[in-house]
Structures are given as structure tokens and as C-alpha cells.
Image (cartoon, helix red, strand yellow):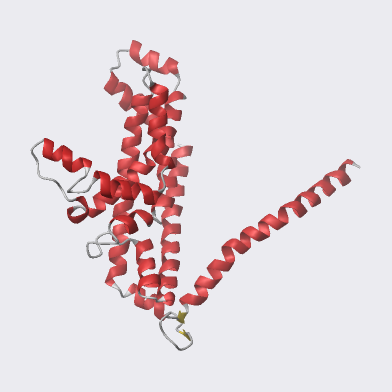
Amino acid sequence: MTVRASRHARRLGRLLVTPSVVALLAWMIVPLAMTLWFAALDYRLLDAGPARFAGLANFAALLADPGFYAAVITTLYLLALALALSVGGGLVLALLLDVAAFGRGALRVLVISPFFVMPTVAALVWKNLMMSPVSGVLAWIAQGLGLPAFDWFAHAPLVAVAIIVAWQWLPFAALIFLTALQSLDSEQREAAQLDGAGPIAMLRYLTLPHLARPAAVIVMIETLFLLSLFAEIFVTTGGGPGNATTNLAFLIYQQALQSYDVGGASAAGLVAVVLANIVAFFMVRLIGRSLTA
């Protein structure tokens, strides 16, 4: 009876899970299949005639376009810069929040708040209220110091976008680091202090090695999201000046909704998915080695 009951329970469990699994597969496979189909067509929205089968012509045209390689380099550069700013800033914030001080609870709430701001709103706030060379807060500070106002989106657009993105991801990195810091054994800290270790030595030999695994997890999660960065670029720079801030996601948008080339945009989307999976594969292997070390 026990064996029959367990078999019946397993069958019932599979039956209950089946609808969600089917829905999930349909949610992923149907768009992928349609993208594959459109990528094999010469399909332009402004053409009056029917779409024609193009085979691999869209992929060949994409790989022959210098703008594609520029978009790949921009994507990787923006990813590296945003990761460096968010992880470094999150580490500093976590170290500051870990210190017992009056009002630490309210300060933690303020640090978390950027994570609840929508990307479009955050980009508009930074563009118009912070980085504007005419009325921005940074321009006001520069003028107060006797320095000329700096036009971020004209002279350093990639850095400006990276700062906006890093500001949004700072709470995530800070919370992960802060949780890891609070799990650090207090006896180890006391032993290091008794052995005469100063703050710099404790940070280098005790705190940073303890934060290696959380840092790896932060990098992996942020990488998966930052590879598809779009809203901040669309709102602030529009991919410019020129194509200075055109990453892969914005390149796909340009081909689909500005050039009306659905076939080329589908091919670019598939290539972007392949590149993102390659990056994610190496990141998972790197993190796996870090976690098992």
C-alpha cells in the first residue's frame, strides 16, 4: 500500500506540474521559433511585397557590418565599467553600514531606495537633475568650486550611462555584501585584533577573502541583466553621440523599429542570445570554481 500510495503521489505531482511546465516551454519556445523564422526571411515592414526567404543572408550582413562589432565592444565596455562601479561602491557602502552608528537603520533604507526606482525614471533624474551642464547638481557643484561645468552625455556618454546603471545596482551589491559581513565570525575579528592586525590588514586578509563568493554571485547576476541594458541608453543618449553608446540591445531596436528590418533585427537578436549565453557560461564556471575553492 505504501508503494502504491507513493507512486500515486508522484503521478499526481507530475499531473499538477505539467500545465506550468507546458506554459513555460511555450513561453520560451514560441518566441524563439518565431525569431528563428524571421531571421531566415528578408522581411521589411515598409516593403509592400511578401517576405522572401533569405537563408543566412541576414547573419552574413550582420557579421559584415562594422557597427555590429562596435556594439559588441560597447556592450562589454559598459558591462565592465558598470560592474566595477557597482561592486566597488557596494563594497564601500557595506563596510560603512556594518559599523555600529546612530541612525544606521534609516541609512540602510536610504541606500536601498534606488533599487525601487524604475530605470526610465532613474535615467531621467540623472540626465536632467544631476548631469545637466546647465542646471544639474554636478554642474552647480563644479561652479561652486570654480570649475567649468562638464557635459557628461556629450564628452563621456558611456561613463555617464555606467554611473546611472551602477547607482541603480548599488543597493543590490551593498545588501549582499552587508549580509556576508554580518555572517563573518566575530571570534576571527577579535583574534586578528589581538594578534595586532590593523584595519588595513583585517580588510585585506580577513574581510575581502570572506567576500569573494558574494562578489562572484553579484557579478554573475548583474552580468545577466546588464547585457540587455536598453532603457537608460534610450532615455539619455539615444545610442549617441554617433554610435558611442549603441550596445547590442539598442542595435536590435534600431534595426527593428527605426530601419524596419525585422529579419536583420531577428538575426541580431539570435546572435546576442548566443553571446549572452557564452558570457553566462564562463561566468557560471568562474563562480563555480570560486564557490568550490
Count all numbered tags in the image, as a single digit. 0
Q: Quadrant of residue 171?
A: top left
Q: Quadrant of residue 181?
A: top left
Residue 246, compared with residue 90, is above or below; it is: below
Residue 141, compared with residue 49, is above or below; it is: above
Taking the image as drawn, is residue 52 in sight? yes
Q: Quadrant of residue 142?
A: top left
- Residue 134 position, x and y percent, is 17, 48
Q: Residue at x 46, y 89 (%)?
A: 49
- Residue 125 position, x and y percent, is 31, 46
Taking the view exactly as shown, the residue that stands out farthest to the bottom is 49
Q: Is residue 44 left or right of residue 1?
A: left
Q: Residue at x 44, y 71 (%)?
A: 266
Question: Which quadrant would the C terminus be assigned to in this image?
Answer: top left
Residue 167, compared with residue 206, is above or below; it is: below
Taking the view exactly as shown, the residue that stands out farthest to the top is 194
Q: Is residue 292 left or right of residue 143?
A: right
39 and 184: which is toward the camera: 39
Taking the view exactly as shown, the residue that stands out farthest to the left is 146
Q: Residue at x 62, y 61 (%)?
A: 25
Question: Which quadrant would the N terminus be assigned to in this image?
Answer: top right
- Residue 128 position, x and y percent, is 26, 49
Q: Residue at x 43, y 75 (%)?
A: 262
206 and 129: which is toward the camera: 129
Taking the view exactly as shown, the residue that stands out farthest to the right is 1
